[in-house]
Image (cartoon, rainbow, N blue to C red):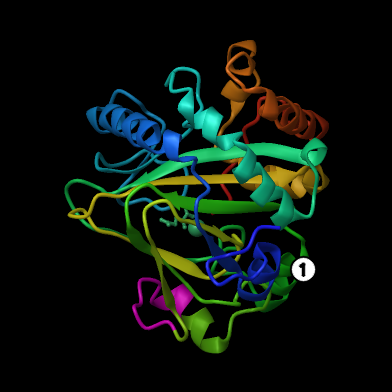
């Protein structure tokens, strides 16, 4: 059983706090290869040679305006031609961690997103306090209802360089916002004074898994190199609930023979599972409209 940096089983820690920090989910021999592959894709995205990217000025998809890049999308896309990303996404320790967090087995794992979060070059950029799957304006009743939907998935940041960009409110992932939190998320969403906020300090090589409905924000510093792998996986039980969150990123390229050929053995079943999920939900082009 995998434990976190405080020796607590990771599934227990994420349930209690909404996030959990884990060491050593990158095999030593893969570390440099991942850094080098990231440098190459970042270079392409900044040059405008890779158009699936997140641009300063906009937090959620679509990213149509601006030039300075804060994230690169679709690390496993066959046109990027960087096999180390699928190799890591399908690596045994990472899959074991995800299976423990989701209380599921390999057969039921669902292949999802793999993106990269980086430092912008020209200016600092802050993401607002948010929950990924619930809008700030949601009325209390709607918020309460959405918070009861199980996630059937987990997401994580794995730092290739020390990374202190993410802030969370521990244990805010399953309850409605307090009046102060509601006020901040709606009227002062860049606030540095969120009650109970915690800076997540990751050392290179550490991973934070977090509930995507924990209240969180991020602060992007253009002077500090960031190259943080940002990914998610789910279970087949998620069905259409998971579809909305995942497919808003536009994943048509995953439903191709060309992509399937690039997958390591450990990802064949998880990949078949997401294609089946999208097909059952009637979304075989694997694209849905943005949530926010
Ligand atoms: O930059 C981060 O660490 C968090 C990114 C984030 O919150 C998001 O992509 O929704
Ligand atoms: Fe987020």
Quarter of the view holding residue 149: bottom right
Residue 213 painted magenta = no
**Region in magenta:** 184-194
Quarter of the view holding residue 69: top left
Q: With 124 as the anchor, is 79 left or right in this view?
A: right
Q: Residues within 10 Å of mark 1 (few under 14, many from 20)?
A: few
The residue shown at (65%, 58%) is 2
Quarter of the view holding residue 189: bottom left
Assign the N terminus to one quadrant of the image: bottom right
Distance from mark 1 CB to nearest ligand 2 atom below 8 Å:
no
Reading the image, the residue beneath label 1 is: 148
Q: Can you give x and y, in whole percent of width and height, for residue 128 in the image?
A: 41, 65
Callout 1: SS: helix
Residue sitting nearer the eye, 100 or 27: 27
Q: With 11 as the anchor, is 51 left or right in this view?
A: left
The residue shown at (30%, 50%) is 226
């Amino acid at each position: 059983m995998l434990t976190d940096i405080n020796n607590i089983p990771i599934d227990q820690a994420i349930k209690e706090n909404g996030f959990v920090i884990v060491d050593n989910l990158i095999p030593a021999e893969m570390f440099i290869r991942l850094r080098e592959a990231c440098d190459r894709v970042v270079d392409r995205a900044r040059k405008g040679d890779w158009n699936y990217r997140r641009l300063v000025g906009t937090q959620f998809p679509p990213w149509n305006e601006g030039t300075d890049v804060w994230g690169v999308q679709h690390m496993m896309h066959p046109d990027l031609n960087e096999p180390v990303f699928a190799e890591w996404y399908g690596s045994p320790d990472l899959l074991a961690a995800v299976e423990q967090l989701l209380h599921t087995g390999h057969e039921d794992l669902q292949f999802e997103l793999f993106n990269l979060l980086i430092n912008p070059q020209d200016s600092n950029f802050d993401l607002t306090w948010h929950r990924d799957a619930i809008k700030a304006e949601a009325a209390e009743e709607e918020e309460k209802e959405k918070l009861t939907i199980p996630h059937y998935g987990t997401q994580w940041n794995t730092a290739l360089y020390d990374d202190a960009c993410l802030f969370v409110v521990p244990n805010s992932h399953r309850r409605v916002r307090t009046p102060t939190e509601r006020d901040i998320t709606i009227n002062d969403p860049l606030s540095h004074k969120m009650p109970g906020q915690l800076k997540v300090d990751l050392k290179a090589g550490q991973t934070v898994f977090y509930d995507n409905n924990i209240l969180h924000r991020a602060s992007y510093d253009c002077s500090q190199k960031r190259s943080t792998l940002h990914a998610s996986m789910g279970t087949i039980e998620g069905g259409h609930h998971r579809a909305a969150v995942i497919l808003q990123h536009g994943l048509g390229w995953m439903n191709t023979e060309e992509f399937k050929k690039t997958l390591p053995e450990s990802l064949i079943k998880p990949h078949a599972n997401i294609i089946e999920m999208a097909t059952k939900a009637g979304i075989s082009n694997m694209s849905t409209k943005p949530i926010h």
